[in-house]
Image: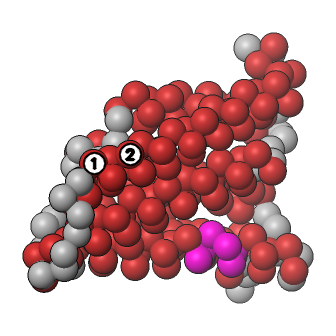
């Protein structure tokens, strides 16, 4: 039986990251006890798969076209799911999410055009910076919600803690949005040959 080289360990980790998304969304949106902590654990597990799949693929020469395409796609699905849940929960400005969505649709469109011409474009360093800042923002925002939840267990927090959370949330979201837009502009510029062919 012929082995499918695309379904190697790094690609399985990428698929696992996508599979974790519905569980992550459920943990964020369903207010069961310690739901934010559960969401953070799931997100952390998904983020670890993101760190591992690329390292394993490069170290053991397991890089595939599927991995080049699916890995950044899995990141987008995970992060956008988090941002949309944050909007639902009043933790994120929808304008930031719209800008991120615009960036992702633009970059994905160029990737699809390139793929139709037989070229797979891997993520560049700016795409990785974007992903890291987004994951830091998501982890930071959920961690603050966990801290706020601790008030129900008797933890004393400053009277203006909700205001502090708002400022930190906005700062994290807009820093990650800045890098999302910047990386998108750089990506489109570097691959303008495919845009000119439209």
Q: Is residue 9 visible?
A: yes
Q: Quadrant of residue 2?
A: bottom right
Is 95 located above or below residue 111 in the figure? above
Q: Which residue is mark 1?
A: 163
Q: Position of residue 153 (x, y in %)?
A: 13, 82
Is 142 located above or below residue 49 in the figure? above
- Is 185 inside the magenta-drawn segment? no
Q: Main secondary structure of the magenta part?
A: helix
Magenta stretch bounds: 48-53
Is 180 located above or below residue 75 in the figure? above
Residue at the location (45% across, 63% down)?
Answer: 140
Give the crowd class for mark 2: few <14, some 14-19, many >=20 residues within 10 Å.
few
Give the crowd class for mark 1: few <14, some 14-19, many >=20 residues within 10 Å.
few
Q: Which residue is mark 2?
A: 167
Q: Quadrant of residue 108?
A: top right
Residue at the location (80% across, 48% down)?
Answer: 124
Q: How is the image coloured?
A: secondary structure
Residue at the location (49% across, 55% down)?
Answer: 137
Q: Quadrant of residue 43?
A: bottom left
Residue at the location (44% across, 33% down)?
Answer: 96
The answer to whether residue 78 is left or right of residue 166 is right
Do the residues under discs 1 and 2 have CB atoms within 8 angstroms?
A: yes
- Compare residues 70 and 47 and report the one nearer the observer: 47
Q: Is residue 28 visible?
A: no
The quadrant of the rendering that contains the C terminus is top right
**SS category of the residue bearing label 2:** helix
**SS category of the residue bearing label 1:** helix
């Amino acid at each position: 039986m012929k082995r499918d080289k695309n379904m190697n360990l790094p690609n399985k980790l990428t698929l696992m990251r996508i599979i974790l998304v519905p569980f992550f969304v459920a943990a964020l949106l369903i207010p069961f006890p310690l739901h934010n902590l559960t969401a953070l654990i799931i997100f952390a597990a998904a983020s670890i798969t993101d760190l591992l799949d690329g390292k394993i693929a490069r170290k053991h020469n397991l890089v595939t076209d599927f991995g080049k395409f699916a890995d950044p796609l899995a990141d987008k699905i995970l992060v956008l799911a988090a941002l949309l849940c944050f909007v639902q929960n009043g933790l994120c400005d929808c304008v930031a999410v719209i800008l991120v969505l615009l960036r992702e649709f633009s970059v994905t469109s160029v990737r699809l055009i390139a793929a139709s011409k037989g070229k797979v474009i891997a993520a560049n360093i700016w795409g990785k910076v974007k992903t890291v800042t987004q994951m830091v923002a998501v982890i930071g925002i959920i961690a603050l919600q966990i801290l706020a939840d601790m008030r129900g267990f008797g933890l004393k927090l400053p009277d203006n803690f909700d205001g502090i959370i708002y400022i930190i949330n906005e700062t994290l979201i807009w820093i990650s949005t800045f890098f999302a837009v910047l990386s998108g502009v750089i990506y489109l510029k570097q691959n303008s040959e495919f845009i000119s062919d439209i």
